[in-house]
Image (cartoon, helix red, strand yellow):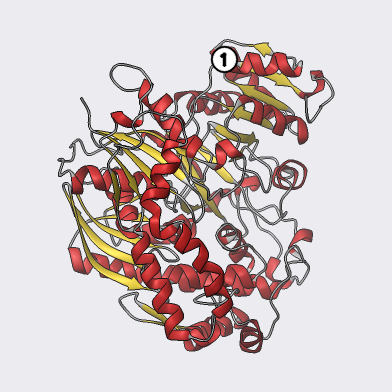
């Protein structure tokens, strides 16, 4: 029988569960997809049930698992080490942070110090047999990240770089993976953290920490490269806030930060004096100064990641690099790392944040605790990150009947051709297929799709469908075999984690956007012949689609190419601002009816908005 391990991530943000069998990922799911609470931090009970139910059916025997069938359940970090950090940090800064300390202590004393009991009680509460006897293990936070990056990668040996806000004590690590072993060679210790530095700027530019970092990354290209303002901000960051060494290690001037023991990320009065502008209020207009500040910290972050990568190369001598941790979701930094050619091979865990720690914890237990060998083969073992819940046509039909929805069933060839025609005609389509994605990116199974050639598509998607800030860019999905026709590097990028640049011949001349001080909401520029996915600096967060990983999505792109000559579509996650990506057919239909989506495709069922009955929020 295969060795079966359940990995758990919970109680901070982005809770998740993952099931592995003999070191292979069988099922992985985010709790938010079931509860519909974005970044849900609660115990991932529904994700666990899905792992055991749907994951169990994918194993030999084809039946749901009980907790008694597991060899172990593994939590992604060690709470006692985190408690040690909390105590030492507050002790060193006493009496500062007393209010936060007294507020945190009851939770720690009641629950977190006794996490083994809490986990066992939560598992017992699911109503499954075997909760009392399941072996409970704990692994360190950054080892979970490292394991999630190395073990599913195609490399038998690789340097491993993990960078985030903070785990227990570590805020980053450099490791070396060989076969089934991972050796941690160096750690960056709290409170000095590249992830927290970036989050501080996320906070100061008016976005929410732990969810708005990608907005800050998307804002950066609106800053003016090489301008006096950007240079001034960079100098202030590097002279006053962060001392960054040639090996990528750093020390942050804690006089300017409040996150260690206080309620805020930064000491706002000192930042305003340093940068000459106040913290931006959430939802207020985005002016040039904040764009330049975003570009300055993005440049500093990219250069620090490059230093860390070179140090990882020096320490390990490896030709390959694996990445995980929240900072590994910074596509612009990843793209620059790829272009620098420091390593021959680069692989990034698609669920690089804390949710991915659930998978890393399970894999670390399998290979390190149980000492099981690692399978060979030299291939990416994430299965296109399509590892989550799947729903049948019967599920979709039951939902449609309950809603009185009108649908048409099409066979595959006609479905792909008809949908391609709708997209070519300017329609926006919700596309719900097969197993949902693992990680924060929609990769063609829970996606909203549009024609990237349409210069109005970015604005339409942002304001009328996604209900989000108009400056934010969208990603292209491109046939893997056609990537070189559109993008300079044209590297494989199946998980939408690398930024590339639109080829020179596809770019269009445009007025100098940087000369304008107008808010970004008024900035309308055509940048290339695929304007809906081309950012201000001609960059794009590319997803290459391979027929082997996602044959249905590849077939749709192929049908669109046959009709238009363009093997590329806009792909954004199937959700609206503030909500998780849709999971069930019901979630998809609800989003379809509450937005200006034109069509919805669930499996082989096509729903036309014009034919649907009036929307009722509750039946």
Q: Could you say which is closer to the camera, residue 196 or residue 331?
A: 196
Residue shown at the point (25%, 36%) measured from the top left: 71
Q: Quadrant of the N terminus?
A: top left
**Left or right relative to 195: residue 314:** left
Vertical side of 290 occupied by 332: above or below: above
Q: Is residue 356 visible?
A: no
Residue 92 appears at what percent x and percent y?
42, 85
Q: Is residue 306 left or right of residue 405?
A: left
Residue at 43% from the left image edge and 43% from the top image edge? 121
Q: How many marks?
A: 1
Along the line of sight, the residue nearer the viewer: 449 or 349:
349
Q: Residue furthest right?
A: 614
Residue 306 in picture, x, y percent from top left: 36, 68
Can residue 469 be seen here? yes
Residue at 71% in and 47% down:
462
Q: Position of residue 170 (x, y in %)?
A: 35, 68
Residue 270 drawn at (x, y percent) = 62, 87
Left or right of 242, for residue 397: right
Which element type, helix, strand or loop, lies under badge 1?
Answer: helix
Q: Which residue is mark 1?
A: 393
Local packing at callout 1 (Cα closer than 10 Å; few below 14, some 14-19, many 20+) is few
Quadrant including the C terminus: top right
Left or right: 462, with 413 as reference point: right
Residue 591 sits above or below residue 577 on the image: above
* Along the line of sight, the residue nearer the viewer: 358 or 574: 358
State the image quarter where residue 87 is shown: bottom left
């Amino acid at each position: 029988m295969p060795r079966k391990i359940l990995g758990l991530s919970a109680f901070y943000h982005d809770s998740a569960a993952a099931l592995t069998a003999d070191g292979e990922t069988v099922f992985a799911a985010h709790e938010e997809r079931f509860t519909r609470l974005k970044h849900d931090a609660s115990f991932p009970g529904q994700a666990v049930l899905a792992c055991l139910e749907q994951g169990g059916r994918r194993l030999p025997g084809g039946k749901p698992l009980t907790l008694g069938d597991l060899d172990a359940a593994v939590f992604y970090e060690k709470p006692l080490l985190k408690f040690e950090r909390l105590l030492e940090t507050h002790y060193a800064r006493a009496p500062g942070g007393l209010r936060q300390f007294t507020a945190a202590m009851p939770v720690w004393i009641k629950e977190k110090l006794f996490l083994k009991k809490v986990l066992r009680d939560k598992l017992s509460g699911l109503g499954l047999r075997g909760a009392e006897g399941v072996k409970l293990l704990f692994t360190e936070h950054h080892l979970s990240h490292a394991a999630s990056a190395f073990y599913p990668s195609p490399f038998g040996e690789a340097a491993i770089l993990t960078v985030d806000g903070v785990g227990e004590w570590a805020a980053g690590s450099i490791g070396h993976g060989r076969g089934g072993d991972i050796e941690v060679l160096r750690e960056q210790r709290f409170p000095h953290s590249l992830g927290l530095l970036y989050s501080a700027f996320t906070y100061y530019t008016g976005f929410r920490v732990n969810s708005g970092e990608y907005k800050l990354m998307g804002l950066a290209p609106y800053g003016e490269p090489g301008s006096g303002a950007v240079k001034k901000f960079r100098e202030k960051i590097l002279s006053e806030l962060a001392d960054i060494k040639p090996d990528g290690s750093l020390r942050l001037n804690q006089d300017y930060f409040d996150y260690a023991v206080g309620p805020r990320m930064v000491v706002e009065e000192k930042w305003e004096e340093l940068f000459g502008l106040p913290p931006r209020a959430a939802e207020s207009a985005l002016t040039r100064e904040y764009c330049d500040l975003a570009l300055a910290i993005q440049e500093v972050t990219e250069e620090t990641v490059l230093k860390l990568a070179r140090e990882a190369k020096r320490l390990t001598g490896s030709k390959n690099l694996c990445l995980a941790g929240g900072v590994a979701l910074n596509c612009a930094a990843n793209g620059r790392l790829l272009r620098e050619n420091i390593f021959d091979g680069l692989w990034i865990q698609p669920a690089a944040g804390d949710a991915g720690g659930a998978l890393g914890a399970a894999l670390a237990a399998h290979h390190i605790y149980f000492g099981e060998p690692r399978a060979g083969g030299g291939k990416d073992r994430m299965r296109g990150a399509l590892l989550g819940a799947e729903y049948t046509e019967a599920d979709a039909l039951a939902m449609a009947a309950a809603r009185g929805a009108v649908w048409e069933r099409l066979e595959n060839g006609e479905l792909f051709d008809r949908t391609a025609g709708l997209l070519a005609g300017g329609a926006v389509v919700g596309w719900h297929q097969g197993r949902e994605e693992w990680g924060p990116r929609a990769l063609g199974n829970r996606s909203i799709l549009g024609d990237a050639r349409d210069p109005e598509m970015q604005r339409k998607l942002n304001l009328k469908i996604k209900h989000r800030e108009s400056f934010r860019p969208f990603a292209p999905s491109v046939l893997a075999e056609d990537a070189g026709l559109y993008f300079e590097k044209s590297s494989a990028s199946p998980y939408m984690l690398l930024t590339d640049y639109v080829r020179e011949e596809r770019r269009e001349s445009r007025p100098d956007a940087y000369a304008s001080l107008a808010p970004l909401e008024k900035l309308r520029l055509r940048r290339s012949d695929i304007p809906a996915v081309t950012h201000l600096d001609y960059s794009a967060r590319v997803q290459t689609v391979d027929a082997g990983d996602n044959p249905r999505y590849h077939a749709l792109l192929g049908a669109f190419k046959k009709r238009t000559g363009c093997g590329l579509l806009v792909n954004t996650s199937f959700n609206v601002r503030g909500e998780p990506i849709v999971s069930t057919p019901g979630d998809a239909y609800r989003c379809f009816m509450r937005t200006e989506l034109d069509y919805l495709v669930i499996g082989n069922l096509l729903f036309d908005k014009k034919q649907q009955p009036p929307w009722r929020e509750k039946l």
